[in-house]
Image (tube, grey):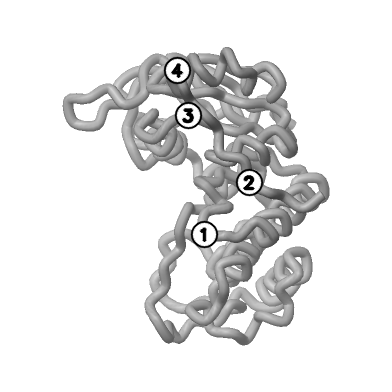
């Protein structure tokens, strides 16, 4: 088993003529939860898009599960299938005729499949298992467009869970959730991380939640300003270095 799930070295990413991510290096060990924090415009989403192979790097290298990513985001299919992504928002057209069970099943289907593919009993069993694990069995026949924000986040985790994954990347996964729903989501994420052996990289603005749930924090403001355990990376001095003088973090009220 590869201990380093992700290894990033000297990564620089441009958006047009602007350097959005500058000479960033870090590694993610297996089965750890790492938070990526920083002010708006710091390059967090750009970094994640490069890690997912969406944006090409200008310099540096990315290795996923020991495999070097190509200049246009190329990875072996066997590696690509072990990486899952939960976006900040997931918009579905009103009354989209796709049930939750059908949607989760798409996570099983081979990439690039054009025609409906049932996959037989293994696929049905995998979908049922993923829905049970995310406490979403009762949603299987609901239209995906009819779900609440919290239900949608659980279904997205089920989509990620339907095949074995090693790396889960989340972009502000708690966005749009009230404090109670966010607590429930992170409780479920923690439960799945332990049971499935996921390595997690998550963008977050909720520094209180980061302190409670993450093993390590990467502080980004175009370049990597600091990294380490939450007590170090989120100290007052480090936050001022990353966010600027006068930064006051917003404190959410979380359930005890």
Quadrant housing the N terminus: top right
| N-term-proximal mark, 4 vs 1 | 1
Residue to which mark 3 is pinned:
38
Compute the Cα span from label 2 to label 4.
21 Å
Q: Residue 176 carries which label?
A: 1
Nearer the viewer's eye, disc 3 or disc 2?
2
- Residue placed under numbered mark 2 in the picture: 252
Q: Do the residues labelled 2 and 4 touch (CB within 8 Å)?
A: no
Q: Is mark 1 on a helix, strand or loop?
A: loop
Circle 4 or circle 1, nearest the eye: 4
Mark with earlier residue (1, 3):
3
Could you give the CA–CA distance between mark 1 and mark 2, rounded to whole angstroms?
13 Å
Tell me where residue 85 appears, x and y as whole percent: 53, 50
Residue 113, position as x, y percentages in the image: 43, 67
Secondary structure under badge 3?
A: loop
Measured Cα–Cα span from mark 3 to mark 2: 17 Å
| Residue 129 placement: quadrant | bottom right
Describe the element under mark 4 as helix, strand or loop: loop
**Residue at mark 4 to residue at mark 1: CA–CA distance:** 28 Å
- Disc with the residue nearer the chain's start (4 vs 3): 3
Disc 4 target residue: 245
Q: Which residue is drawn at 36% across and 24% down?
A: 21
Distance, label 4 to label 3, CA atoms, is: 14 Å
Q: How far across and how far down the image is residue 206, in percent? A: 59, 41
């Amino acid at each position: 088993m590869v201990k380093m799930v992700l290894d990033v070295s000297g990564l620089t990413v441009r958006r047009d003529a602007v350097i959005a991510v500058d000479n960033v290096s870090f590694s993610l060990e297996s089965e750890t939860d790492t938070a990526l924090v920083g002010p708006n415009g710091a390059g967090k989403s750009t970094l994640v898009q490069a890690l997912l192979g969406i944006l090409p790097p200008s310099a540096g290298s990315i290795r996923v599960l020991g495999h070097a990513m190509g200049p246009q985001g190329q990875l072996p299919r066997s590696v690509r299938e072990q990486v899952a992504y939960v976006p900040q928002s997931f918009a579905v057209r009103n009354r989209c005729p796709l049930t939750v069970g059908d949607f989760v099943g798409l996570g099983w289907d081979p990439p690039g499949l054009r025609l409906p593919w049932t996959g037989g009993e293994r696929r049905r069993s995998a979908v049922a298992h993923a829905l049970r694990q995310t406490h979403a069995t009762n949603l299987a026949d609901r239209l995906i467009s009819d779900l609440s924000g919290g239900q949608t986040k659980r279904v997205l985790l089920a989509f990620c869970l339907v095949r074995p994954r090693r790396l889960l990347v989340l972009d502000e996964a708690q966005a749009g959730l009230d404090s109670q729903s966010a607590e429930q989501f992170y409780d479920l994420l923690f439960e799945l991380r332990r049971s499935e052996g996921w390595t997690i990289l998550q963008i977050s603005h909720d520094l209180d939640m980061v302190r409670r749930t993450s093993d390590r924090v990467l502080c980004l403001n175009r370049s990597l300003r600091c990294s380490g355990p939450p007590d170090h990376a989120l100290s007052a001095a480090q936050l001022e270095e990353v966010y600027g003088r006068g930064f006051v973090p917003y404190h959410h009220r979380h359930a005890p």
